[in-house]
Structures are given as C-alpha cells and as structure tokens.
Amino acid sequence: MEKDNKTKDSESSIPEMEIDRKYSEKKSVVESPEKAQKEMEKTKKELDKIKNFIVKKYNYVQSISLLPPQATKLFIDEEEVPKETEKYMHLYVIVPEEKLKEIPKIKTEVVKQIDSLQKNLKQKIWLQVKTPIDVWEMCLDSKFELSAAVSMSFPLYDKGILGAMRVAEIHKSLVLQKFEKYVVSYVIGGSLVRGEAVKSSDVDVFVIINDTDVKKMPRLELKERLRSIIYQYVGEAESLAGVKNKLSPQVYLLTDFWESVKDAHPVIFTFIRDGVPIYDRGTFMPWKALLRMGKLKPSPEAIDMFMSMGDQTVKRAKRIMLDIVIQDIFYGVSTPSQALLMLYGLPPTNVKETVKEMKRIFVDKEKMLEKKYYDILEEICIKYYKGYEHGKVKEVTGKELDRLLKNMELYVKRLKELREQIDKKAQERTIEQIYKDVFELLKTIVKTKSQVATITEFEKDFVKAGKFTPQHLRILKDIVSARSDFKKGKLNAHKVDQARKSASVLINDLIEYNQRCELLNNKKE
C-alpha cells in the first residue's frame, strides 16, 4: 500500500493524459496479466517493424510516437480524423518542414507497410504525418490539449523534438499546478521551435507572471519567489521526462514585459515573433498578432536609444582594444622579462628598468638575445604603455592590435628559449665553480697540477691511508664526470644540483683537513 501511495504521488505531477494512459495499461495488466503481456510483446514487435521501416526509408524523420488513447477523441474532433478511428492506435510521425510536399508519398508507403502487418495486430493503426509547424499551429490556435497529447505521446523513435516538448510540458504542468493564477503565458522558443532540437539541446521556455493584482508583497519579491519555485521544478521535470535536454526557463513580470515591448527591446520582439505558447490566457497571442500587423511600434525615445547603441559599441570596442594592449599585451611581455632578469640575479625592476636591463644584459653583455626582440619589448612598454600613461596613446587600430599580438607571441616564444639558455649558462657556471673550488683545495694538500695526477695521488695517499673515505673519492670522480657530461650536453639541471650537494660534503671535509694541517704546523713552530 505504501508503494502504491508513492507511485500515485510521483505521477500526480504528470499531465492527466499521461496518468490516465498509465492507469489504463496497469488495469489491463491486472485483469489478465499473461494475456496482456503476450499481446503487448506482440504489438511492440509489430510496431518496431513499422518504426524500422519508416526510419530506414525516410531517415530524416524527426519522431515516431503513439498518441495517448484518451486523446484520440480530441484529434477526431479537431483534426477531421474519421470517427471510427477512436479505438485505433494513432501513430504520429513528425517530419521536417522542408519535406512537407513528400507527406502524401510517405503516408502511402507507410500505410502499405501497416496494412501488411495489420493482421498480426489486435488493434488497428491510424497514421498521422505532420511537420513541427503543424504542432506549433495547434498552440497558436490555443489547442493546447492537442499539443500536450503530442508532447506526452509514447516515443518509438525520437531525434530530440519529442523529448524537448515533453520536458517543457511536464514543467508547465508542475508550474500551473502550483500557482496557475499568476501565470499568464508559458512559451517555448529557441532550437525547439526552429525544428533543430536534438537530444542534448537546451529547451528555452519563457514564463510571464501577472503582477498587476499583487497587493501583499512588492513586485520584485513576487518575481523572486515565483522564479525560485519555477527553477526548483526544472530538475523534477527533467527527471520525469527522462531526457537529457536541459530546461532553461526565463521569468518575466507582465508589467516589465509590457515596458520592454513599449521600448521595442530587440530580445522581446524576437521572443514574441518566434515564440510558441503552450499555455496562454489571452496575453501572448494578441502581442503576436499586433507584431505581425506592424502595430507594435517603438517610441521615438526607444529609437534614439537603440540608434545610439551603435556609437556606444564602437567606443566600447576601441576601449577594449586599447585595454588589450596596455594590460594584456604589456604584462604579457614585461612580466616574463622581469622574471628572467631575476633569474639572472637582478632584483625586481620597474617598466623602464626592465627594458634597459634586458638590453644591457642579454643583448649587449651576454649577447643571448637578438635586437629585434628587444625592439618588440621597447615598443610595447615605452611607446604604448608609457605613451598611454602620458596621454599620448588614446586608441589603437585593429591592424595595430593584430601586429602587437603577433609580436608578443614571437617575443614570449623567444623568452622561453632564452630561459633555457640562461639555465644552461647558470648550470655551466655552477659546475665549473664546483670543479674549481674542489681542485684548488686538493692542490693545497696533493701538490700536483694535472687532474689525473691529483685524483691518483688523492686516492693513493689520502683515501687508502684512511685520511679520507671512499665516498670522498666517489664524489670527486662524480664531479669530474658531471663536468665532462655537461660539456657534451648530456647533463641536466637535476644532475647539476645533485653534484652541487655532493660537492659540499667533499669541500667541507677538505677545508676541515686543511685547517687541521695548518693548526698542527702552527703548534710545531
């Protein structure tokens, strides 16, 4: 019993047609479960054959579905469908608008296929082939029960239009159940109305709230409260619809909407022109009719406002281009330049110092950077950045911006190469300094000149004699090997750092040994 209550609660949010259909299916299963199951499997198999035939022959078909049984009477009354089809299964096929002229041919071919399979079906099938515009015409004629029936039809095949319609229909039903008296229009738009919806498309919907009869709370508070609830229902609607389409609702107050219409806001005009209501209390359709008749005209003030937007856009675009130069491009060349100067050993520099030091150190002294790259840095930092600070540069052209962007890319790429050069030079200085320090200390105790002789004598007279350990000899050989590898281009920064750390052990012990020797000599004297 508890399970039945939960099922009832979850289905109470779905439109009544869907509930009735589910109830009818459940009832038939309860009355004769085995017979109903076999009949259902047989029907499904035959319907799959029809669906596969249609999809294979007409691969542009957007959807194939079965209309809810309880809704067939609506189509009989409104769509001039024969009365005897009330007990038929109504197969609803949607094709793109550009295939409108092919509908008679499609009907003929599909009906033949249906007739060939009809003997295997207990229930006859009635075929309807429509375009999305036919569905939207139902909405524009305020035949919302018909469009709801299509939305909630059982999908046999769907490229996205049915799923998008279903999630919007369920969300609309949830919203109306909660506060129907405030909703004047629920309108769909975007790719769904254009016939471009796919299974991952966002579903754009617009909800217009009547705020003209609200006395107990401010209008904005009403809007925020209702909008909060409307957005809360989005996840529930998507879950009940069982689709991947993301619902994107926009909420408008009626008075604000009228104000936007009066001011000829382009977004609102587009919304009125292209939107299709799936619920309307006589508000949206009059706007749409007035717009078609050319009677929704902007005020002179609105025209002036929108005309001025062109000049404002030009100014904004120029300001953005200048900002790119004096902010992004400037920092794009100056910051990495400062970093390399600090890597070289200089303290942080200002703009002018950065330009000056890059030339003095890397162009003139080290000769590691070509002058053309320095010229790029100088132009961006001095001509443009400092020029802007002093009021000399007030705007840049698109051509200038493109050139400076290209130069910045070249400069940054070259600085990356320069950093590798600096690192290599620093590593070279490090390994040479280590080698120099170690062998100068060794010569004070070994008294030889050549590298080979120094190592040989150190091993023979000091390591084997127990004055130094084998580890000291290994470190000495590693330093010699590291220096040799570096000159061959085989050594990296990690190995250099390891050599430096190991060398510190040997250097400290050599210094300590020399100090002990000097102390002993002093005592003898």
Image (tube, helix red, strand yellow):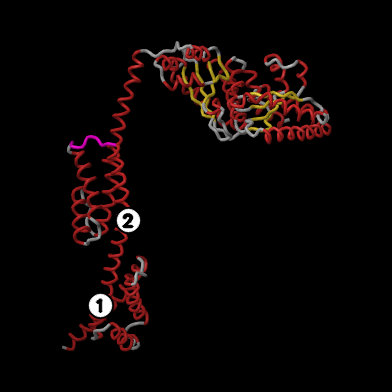
Task: Check disc 1: other Cα within 10 Å, few if <14, some if 14-19, many if 20+.
Answer: some
Which quadrant holds residue 423? bottom left
Viewer-proximal residue, 468 or 176?
176
- Give the quadrant of the N terminus: top right
Q: Would you identify the image quadrant in which residue 427 lies?
A: bottom left
Q: Nearer the viewer, residue 284 or 52?
A: 52
Q: Position of residue 178 (x, y in %)?
A: 57, 21
Residues rendered magenta in the picture: 391-397
Q: Quadrant of residue 237?
A: top right
The vertical placement of 141 against 317, above or below, is above
Residue 101 lies, with reference to residue 399, above or below; the image says above
Residue 210 horizontal/vertical position (percent): 49, 15
Q: Which residue is mark 1?
A: 511
Q: Name the residue tied to disc 2.
A: 416
Q: Secondary structure at mark 1?
A: helix
Residue 229 in view of the camera: no
Assess whether residue 261 is covered by the magenta stretch. no
Amino acid at the residue labelled 2: Lys
Could you tell whether 33 is left or right of 161 in the image?
right
In space, the residues marked 1 and 2 are separated at their CA atoms by: 40 Å
Identity, as a three-letter code, of the amino acid under mark 1: Ile
Please give left or right for residue 212 compared with residue 473 in the image. Answer: right
Q: Nearer the viewer, residue 156 or 8?
A: 156
